[in-house]
Amino acid sequence: MEKRTRGNIILLTGGRLVSLFGSGVQGIAIPLYILDQTGKASMMGLFSIASLIPALLFAPLAGVLGDRFNRKMIMISTDVVRFLLVSLLAVLATLDMLALAALFIVQVFVSISDSLFNSSSDGILPDLVNIESLHKVNATKGGSEAAALILGPVAGGVIYGVGGILPVFIINAFSFALSGVLEGFIRYRRTTGDTAKLTIRFFGVRVKEPFQFVYRHPAIRQLFIMGTAMYFLLYPLFDVVLPFIVKKTIGFSSTQMGVLFGFLMGGMLLGNIVTSGIFKRMGPKKLIRFGLVAEMLLIMMVGTSVLPFIMSALGGASLHFFTILCVLMAIIGFFCTWVLMPVNTNMQKIVPNEMRSRFYSVFNMSTQAAVPLSAVIYGVLLDIVSSFYIVFGVGVVFSLLALNFLLRAKEEIYNPQTK
């Protein structure tokens, strides 16, 4: 990897690392603050909606803008906007004027800025490296994001517990400022050439094109469907069902719950490092297939381990059983990267540069929109079905889905024609 490329990647991943860390700090602290102020879990749910819905609604437009304008300047501009918005919250907190209404309104605009930033940062990455180094860069990016997802929430809980909400806002505002400064040093030349006049018809056509691309491209369509299905099945499993089982059914503490997810993220961090090293030797086809099979078996093992008679045999709320779950979570995170990294790399190769921001906006919108819907479904199921049967059932459904994908996957998914 040449010196200029290496420098660009350090700046880009460094910027994402600090901004994700700051967002992680604030992301865990704000729900705690809302709960302290209102005592109502429903208000935390409303804040989650205020975080998610604006980003989903704005995603197609964000993709159009990311393909139309300079992606680097969009990233810097959105970091500046988020810095100003979070700084406003810090000022309000300092003056003891932080109303929940202000918190919700600011979050709407932060979410829109997040959507615009993400579409441009996803689109810019392949422009900064040569095609042979793309897998290493995706591994570095994935590793830095996993590290931020481990450290941010842990730090956020400690910082809020010790100093309240003000230092949380200060740290997050500083993270956006530092991210913008780092991005400013990225050496980037705009490679998209769309100069059509900005009209309503222009936006309508450009928004429609990525959907048409997905529909007409068999390999991308398979990846799109598989990605959405996996988010629908697995994200709420780890975010809703397993926390319920760990705390309510087994009887582990909140701290142990946090440790379990730390092992999951730690496994992903290690997985990105290892996957980068073995990518060329194994190739994307073996990595994806082996990773999917491993995930099938591991999720089935988790589902089996929480069945009542198995859980009892393993000691219930014991250190022995907790250790087993920690190991399983770490291995799940490890092999997850064997699928995610090569799939993401190959999608970047398949999707044309002039459509890349729009495609990732649509892809992220589809996967993220599946999450709240499935979370509601899982929540209803938890009220009527024993939780351990849900985990086991999800393991079965995911295994069938993965087997169907492995049997029918187009060759271009594994060995794409570069654009």
Image (tube, rainbow, N blue to C red):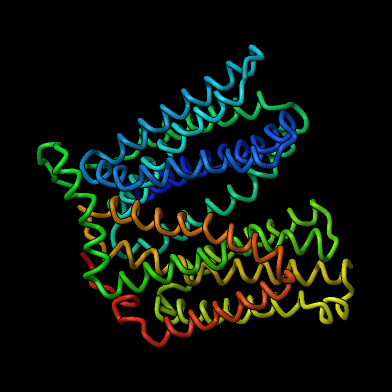
For this orientation, the residue located farthest to the bottom is 407
Front-lying residue, 28 or 130 = 28
Query: Looking at the image, which residue is at 37% across and 67% down?
Result: 224
Above or below, 385 against 123 in this view is: below
In terms of depth relative to the viewer, which is nearer, 266 or 211?
A: 211
**Extreme top residue here?**
95
Instruction: Please identify the quarter of the rendering in which residue 186 is found.
Output: top left
**In the depicted structure, whether residue 209 falls above or below residue 11:** below
Residue at point 80% right, 58% down?
Answer: 247
The one nearer the camera, 21 or 132, is 21
Q: Residue furthest front?
A: 384
- State how many labels appear: 0
- Provide residue 218's location: percent of width, then percent of height: 27, 75
- Residue under the point 69% across and 79% down: 301
Where does residue 387 sit, x and y in percent of width and height? 72, 69
Rendered view: 350 above or below 372: below
The image position of residue 97, as x and y in percent, is 62, 15
Quadrant of the drawing holding the C terminus: bottom left
Image quadrant assignment for residue 215:
bottom left
Q: Compared with residue 343, is residue 86 higher up or lower down, i.e. above or below?
A: above
Left-right relation of 35 to 27 = right
Q: Locate the N terminus by quadrant.
A: bottom left
Residue under the image location 40 percent in, 48 percent down: 9
Furthest-left residue in this view: 196
* Percent coordinates x, y for residue 42 in the rendering: 66, 41
